[in-house]
Amino acid sequence: VSDNRQQLVEMADALFADLAGLSFVDAWPRLEEAGFGSLLIDESDGGFGGDWGDLAAIMRLAGYHALEAPLGEHVVAMHLLADAELKTPEGPLSLAVHSGGGVPFGRHVTAAIVRGEDGVCLKAGKISEATNPAGEPRDFVEWDGLGAQSLEIDLDILEYLAFLRVCQTAGALDAALALTIEYCSERQQFGRPLSKFQAVQQSIASLACEAAAVNCAAQGMAIALDSPGHASFEIASAKLRANAAIKTGCALAHQVHGAIGFTRDYPLNRLTRRMMGWRTEGGNDAYWSERLGCMVRDKSGAQLWDFLVRRPG
């Protein structure tokens, strides 16, 4: 890990910990002041000059602390606008697809980069408020074609959203694991800590495996995005693995915690409710299974092996 990334992670970890539990309105000014929007913008253009590995590390922490803000969407949108040499509007930005469900924090953002029939554009529109399982804004937007700015590039917004959700899931699973270990160390049953029971130890070990798998998948995506060529294969694989880990990991964490894990005063549900919403954001299992299948279905055994071993990382 580079010194720049280590410093970035330390700063973000402390800031996100302070912002944990705050609403978007209270959290965003401090995130904007920290300058995360320039993370993926080249230093020659006045940006931080970071890479996708840096963003993956930041979004893992955003997931760990259940940050209530479209931070990753804003960073990616700023990067895409800079690459397209378009003027950046004031305020937070988001990402969306015309038929891809609600827009993350749509009611709070100035505009969103949208993939639709007319290509990839920066747009705004009329908001119909909606939320995800965690109560965060996932608003539906009636897009206004007036004033739309075309980025004149071909890209898949769902891939970027999938990347962000996998990274956030990695952090959220790590946080759920930490809560579960702490709870089992403190909670007594039959005169012994829960952590001393073999069945509980097995559940914790399984949860740790799910968290580790998603963290590895997130790193694989970042390496692929920072390498020449397309990262579609890594993103599809990672999103499917993260979706599976959410289903298994949330169940394990709640099973060990029992009833207390479902109470709003206990932090576990802030993590698991977000993760359950992330399973469908950025493409669900069916979508990415089909995409992944199309990438490999025409390859022979030898061709598939060669394709896999030549991937970045």
Image (cartoon, helix red, strand yellow):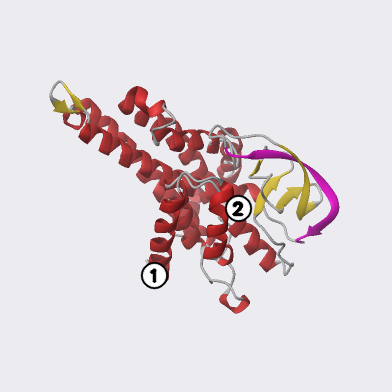
Residue placed furthest toward the top: 190
**Residue 253 in picture, x, y percent from top left:** 35, 31
Q: Quadrant of the N terminus?
A: bottom left
Residue at position x 43%, y 36% from top?
245
**Residue 52 in picture, x, y percent from top left:** 51, 61
Q: Is residue 70 left or right of residue 125?
A: left
Q: Are marks 2 and 1 in contact (CB under 8 Å)?
A: no
Residue at position x 75%, y 61% from top?
151
Q: Is residue 18 left or right of residue 76?
A: left
Q: Mark 2 is on which residue type?
A: Glu
For the residue pair 44 and 36, the one nearer the viewer reads as 36
Give whichever of discs 2 and 1 has the lower sequence position: 1
Q: Secondary structure at mark 1?
A: loop
Please give the residue where the numbered disc 1 appears in the rendered image: 2
- Main secondary structure found in the magenta portion: strand
Please give the residue where the numbered disc 2 appears in the rendered image: 73
- Residue range corresponding to the magenta coloring: 136-151
Residue placed furthest toward the front: 26
